[in-house]
Amino acid sequence: MNAAITPSVALIEPEHEVARRPSFKSRALHNRTFMAGAVMITTIVALVLLAPVIGRYSPVGQDLLHTLSGPSALHWLGTDELGRDTWSRLLYGGRTDLQVGVLAVIFPFCFGVFIGTVCGYFGGRLDSTVMRIVDVVLAFPFYVLIIALVFFVGVGTHGIYIAFALTDWVVYARMTRSGTMVARTLDWVAAAEGGGLSRARVLWRHILPNTVTQAIVYSMSDIVIVILAVVTLGYLGLGIQPPAPDWGSMITDGQNFLQTDQWMAIMPGVAVVFTGIALSLLGDGLADILRPE
Amino acid sequence: MVLGVVVVTFLLLRLIPGDPARMVLGPHAPESAVAALRRQLGLNLPIWRQFWAYLYALAHGNLGTSIYYKAPVASLIAPRLALTGSLVLVATFFAIVITVPLAAFAATRQDRPGDHAVRLFSLMGLGMPKFWLGIIMIIFFSLDLHWFPVGGYGTTLWQHLYSLVLPGLCAAFAIVPVLIRSLRVGMLEVLGADYVATARAKGLRPSRVTFVHVARNALVPTVTLLGINIAYLIGGTVVIERVFALNGLGDLMLSSIGVNDFPVVQGVTLVYALGVIVVILITDLVTARLDPRIRLK
């Protein structure tokens, strides 16, 4: 998919002349995977942000005279058992789910990258202790741990943030640690150290830029994982609490009407899958673009 | 590792904001009842004594007492282990049966339509909530086609297996996309290896090269990957048991959450983690058997 970017150029050029790598922007524009993901995600974000304009109905407004109506000109995707407009609920639900998904990843990302860099660079006691903790967290099945944490901390958005803050950093830490351990042995890092730069500067300016790209790429799939978890928690009644719309609880509501009104359970899932594909494409594309030659 | 897992499950209780006893009994319970429950749970002791008591009880196979069922947690978990265990087994079987051929298919047709189709398939799987997939399967296979039961577990062995087909497939899909992606890359590497070129040059049939030379060498990374991802699969069964109304461990966990029965939630969480540790050990042993190089170390 991405083969068109550099290797062909490098083949034509004589060996002593170094082919200049195209800029990030041009590499991004020529990467079809990345662009497809970017277009999809922009569409989703635009739809979700414009919810008050294109939603036409309040996501929580009930209309008990028009419950469970199928798709029509008035209600594009029909209404649920309380007469709430499914299209509006889908948009506002996406708003909450995307927001929670993105916010929940920020702390684990920063903390994981930080602790991974420190552990990978300095090693020693701290490193072995942290890696022990990482192993223990990974021994728990992801959903079991998240469900248990949300239950003990308290159901709802705030519980979700805490649950992810406590568990999700381990993947970033592990990834950044191994990246840092590799980078530490490289010549230019030794040169920077030999040149008398402070450790903080070496870590921040010479090592981190090389290790953080992998974490950024992973964060795309991580947002997918977190959104899936938020939706799943919503489905179980442990996530975003009604009446606030959320894709997960919409599927739960729809499950009661599988015999008659199947679209109620299907539509929110389609939204989740679409978002998931968009973010995965974006992540795959970024991985191609940021991969060192 | 086991000790670490025990510490984490013990600390879970500490995460409750405020008083666990008060949380169980609700805001209107009399203070005396709350104090009694606190004593019963040992919450009035200093934390290290609580931990010691917890460890001591665990060493004797005691996972605590359920507040709601008024029965030992272990006795609640034991009868449900078989169902969750079989679900995990069935799902693992499906995961392998689906992943290996698809990954081989994609890897042998790199960057051609077949490859793109498989990659799109795994991309869709990545972003799909498994419980939703379960609902779709119920709509399609149970309600429309009447092939499988909507839920439940049946009574005979045959019925058990039969009712685990849809949940198993569904649970398998929790890890199939990740497995396909990694195995495809792994196979591409093997396909580029010298001995594969040799095998081809010898004039062996392409199918023989794929299955004997490539698949065999891609097997070790598959098992390793399975070991890494199995925890995710096991976690997914919690939700899938709910979708298909199966009375397994996950169902026990979720229904106990509904009634604030935290000793049960704690116990189930611990059992799940121990299960994962056992599975990881098994995959380590299996890879050692499959790959002589690992055995020699």
Image (spheres, rainbow, N blue to C red):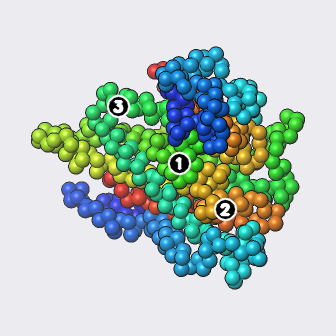
Mark 3–mark 1 Cα distance, whole angstroms, equals 29 Å
Is B195 drawn above or below residue B290 in the view shown?
A: below
Residue drawn 46% across the image and 61% down it: A282
Q: Amino acid at mark 2?
A: Met
Disc 2: which residue: A250
For the residue labelled by badge 3, is the local secondary structure a helix, a strand or a loop? Answer: helix
**Which residue, given by chain and number where applicable, does mark 3 sit on?**
A127
**Within-10-Å neighbours for mark 1: few <14, some 14–19, many 20+:** many
**Hey, what amino acid is under mark 3?**
Asp
Evaluate if marks 1 and 2 touch, with contact meaning CB atoms under 8 Å apart: no
SS under mark 1: helix
Q: Which of B218 and B51 lies nearest the eye of the viewer? A: B51
Q: Is residue B96 above or below residue B279?
A: below
- Residue A25 tag number: none
Q: Position of residue B244 (x, y in %)?
A: 76, 48
Q: Earlier in the sequence, mark 3 or mark 1?
A: 3
- Residue A83: percent from the left, percent from the top? 72, 72
Judged left or right of residue A270, residue B45 is: left
Q: Quadrant of residue B139?
A: bottom right
Q: Are marks 1 and 2 on the same chain?
A: yes
